[in-house]
Every structure is written in structure tokens, then in C-alpha cells.
């Protein structure tokens, strides 16, 4: 129940955050918003990046939540929870095998630009909600994966971890797309069951990811929010935390996030806007 004297979140936010439209008009007065973003990065003590599905759609991975996405065809409650997996692993592997095919995608120009920005000292690291590993494939070094990844797979029976290549070489359980590893060592209490190290909907964010994002957050005074509507927690909290410690928010999105209220909005495609910002930043540094 809401207390009548409790300040409304929205009102509380509006007091401290410029309206995105205002931020845009302001930046037009002072110049190109691309140059503003580049200048803010150059001036920041520490810049971090939060990315979501939107950075991968331009690599051909449909947003899982979109109308053509994975969750339109596979109900996450039935296919993307640990409970469902433990109940019917072979069924869930039908979806996972399709996910594997999707994740064959290659990084795009935006991923490469972010890697270039990090290599040049322009960002401290990336927190991503994606499981596709495209930031690392593009050369980014410090990447915190809130929702895990599918580079490795863990047996829920014995805890052994397997690489993706090893899993691909395994035979399938007949009539399914579920790989069958060697039997778990004797005395293992549960049956052998391979699960990708992605975070299912009913699982906790990996502790190392929480620690990694806390470390990135410390001292950050600028966050680039890219390709995410910032609706899924805890990632959605990150921009608010940067603002809470006196920092600014730059949003790069095709569709502006409803609740974000950035200090600067660059509306456009990741693969075009991100390289333009990094090019401008490199010119400033030169
Ligand atoms: Zn095992």
C-alpha cells in the first residue's frame, strides 16, 4: 500500500532529471548531440556501459521479448525456468538448440566501436543483459554478463563444466536435441543433465556478475545506456545508481526507454550512432 505522504517516484525523478526532449533541445542549442556525448565521455572520470537486446538485433538476433522473438514462440515459464528444465530437460533443449543457432551471429559496427572505446581508455567496462558473447567477440575485455552466457555448460548432476565445442561433439539423447555427456562419476546424487550457463528466469544473477557490476559502478560518473528499455532488474537500476552518485546518463536507443529520463538521448541505430560517437571521441583526443 502506498503511503499518502510518500513522494511519487515519477515526481521525485522529474525534479532531478531533465526531460529527454529538453535535453535534446538543449544539446541542439550547444551543438551536435553526437559531439556532446563524445565530450562527456572525454570529460568523465569513469564511463560505464549498459547494453541490452537492441545491440544484438542489428547482428540478426531478434529481441527475445519482441513479437518475433523466442518468447513469442516459447513460453518462458515453460521453457526458460530452472523448474521447467529440471522437470522436462529434453523439451527445454528443443528451445536451447534453437538459441544456439541464433547465437551464431557476428558482432556489428556498434560492438566494434565499444571495443575501440575501451581499448582507448574511454570506458571502464560493459554490463550486458545479453547472453550472446558479441561484446567479447568484438574485442571488449571487461564485460559483466548479468544473465550468464552460453560459452560453457554445467552438468546439474555432478557440477562438471563443458565448453561449447565439447557439448557440440556429444551425441544426442535419441529423439531429442539434448546432448548426452559421459555419465556422472559414481555416487553423484542427481542424474546427469547439461544446462547452458545462461541465467533462467527463476535463477539468481550470478554472484560474480553482481560483484563485477558493483566494481564497475564504483566512481562511475557517466553511463551509456544502449539498446535496452531498462525494464529488467537489476540492470535497470544501474543508470539510477550512476545518477545517484552524481553522474549522467546518455541513452542510445532506436525507441527511447519510457522510464529512463536521460540527460542526453541519441535516437538511432546502435551500429551507426555508436561508431559516430567513438569517432568524435577519437577526434577530441587527437
Ligand atoms: Zn554429470
Image (tube, rainbow, N blue to C red):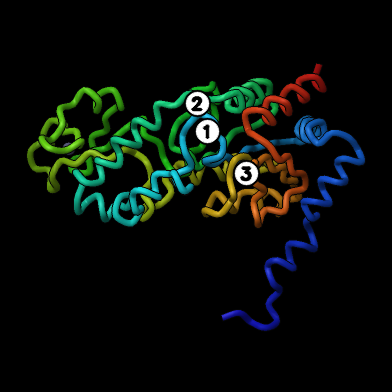
Q: Earlier in the sequence, mark 1 or mark 3?
A: 1
Of label 2 and label 3, which has the lower sequence position?
Answer: 2
Q: Does 158 sit left or right of 237 as displayed?
A: left
Quick one: which residue is furthest to the left in this view? 186
Describe the element under mark 3 as helix, strand or loop. Answer: helix
Which label is found at residue 221? Answer: none
- Ligand 1 closer than 8 Å to the CB at disc 2? no
Q: Quadrant of residue 30 in the image?
A: top right
Residue occupying the point 77% across, 25% down: 281
Residue position for label 3: 217
From this viewpoint, is residue 220 visible?
no
Q: Nearer the viewer, residue 222 or 77?
A: 77
Q: CA distance from mark 1 to mark 2?
A: 7 Å
In front: label 1 or label 2: 2
Question: Dot 2: what SS?
Answer: helix
Quadrant housing the C terminus: top right
- Residue 216 can be seen, yes or no: yes
Question: Which residue is denoted by mark 1 in the rendering?
Answer: 143
Task: Report the residue that reaches farthest toward the front.
Answer: 68
Mark 1 lies on a secondary structure that is strand
Few, some or many C-alpha atoms within 10 Å of disc 2 (few <14, some 14-19, many ≥20)?
some
**In the rendered view, would you say 114 is above or below 13?**
above
* Quadrant assignment, res 44: top right
| Nearer the camera: disc 1 or disc 3 | 1
CA distance separating discs 1 and 3: 13 Å
The residue at the far right in this view is 29
Residue 82 image offset from top left, x and y in percent:
29, 52
Residue nearest the viewer, comparing 27 with 223: 27
Amino acid at each position: 500500500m502506498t503511503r499518502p505522504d510518500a513522494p511519487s517516484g515519477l515526481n521525485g525523478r522529474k525534479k532531478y532529471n531533465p526531460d529527454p526532449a529538453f535535453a535534446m533541445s538543449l544539446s541542439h542549442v550547444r551543438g551536435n548531440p553526437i559531439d556532446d556525448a563524445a565530450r562527456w565521455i572525454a570529460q568523465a572520470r569513469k564511463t560505464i556501459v549498459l547494453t541490452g537486446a537492441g545491440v544484438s538485433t542489428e547482428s540478426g538476433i531478434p529481441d527475445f521479448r519482441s513479437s518475433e522473438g523466442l518468447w513469442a514462440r516459447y513460453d518462458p515459464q515453460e521453457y526458460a525456468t530452472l523448474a521447467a528444465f529440471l522437470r522436462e530437460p529434453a523439451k527445454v533443449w528443443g528451445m536451447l538448440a534453437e538459441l544456439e543457432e541464433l547465437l551464431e551471429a557476428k558482432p556489428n559496427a556498434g560492438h566494434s566501436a565499444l571495443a575501440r572505446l575501451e581499448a582507448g581508455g574511454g570506458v571502464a567496462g560493459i554490463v550486458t543483459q545479453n547472453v550472446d558473447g558479441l561484446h567479447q567477440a568484438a574485442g571488449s575485455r571487461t564485460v559483466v554478463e548479468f544473465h550468464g552466457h552460453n560459452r560453457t555448460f554445467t552438468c546439474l548432476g555432478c557440477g562438471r563444466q563443458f565448453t561449447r565445442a565439447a557439448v557440440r561433439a556429444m551425441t544426442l539423447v535419441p529423439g531429442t536435441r539434448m546432448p548426452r555427456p559421459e555419465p556422472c562419476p559414481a555416487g553423484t546424487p542427481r542424474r546427469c543433465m547439461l544446462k547452458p550457463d545462461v541465467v533462467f528466469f527463476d535463477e539468481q544473477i550470478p554472484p560474480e556478475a553482481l560483484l563485477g557490476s558493483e566494481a564497475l559502478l564504483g566512481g562511475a560518473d557517466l553511463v551509456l545506456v544502449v539498446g535496452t528499455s531498462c525494464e529488467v532488474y537489476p540492470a535497470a537500476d544501474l543508470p539510477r545508481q550512476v545518477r545517484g552518485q552524481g553522474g549522467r546518463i546518455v541513452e542510445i536507443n532506436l525507441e527511447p526507454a519510457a522510464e529512463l529520463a536521460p540527460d542526453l538521448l541519441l535516437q538511432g541505430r546502435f551500429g551507426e550512432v555508436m561508431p559516430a560517437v567513438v569517432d568524435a571521441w577519437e577526434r577530441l583526443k587527437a
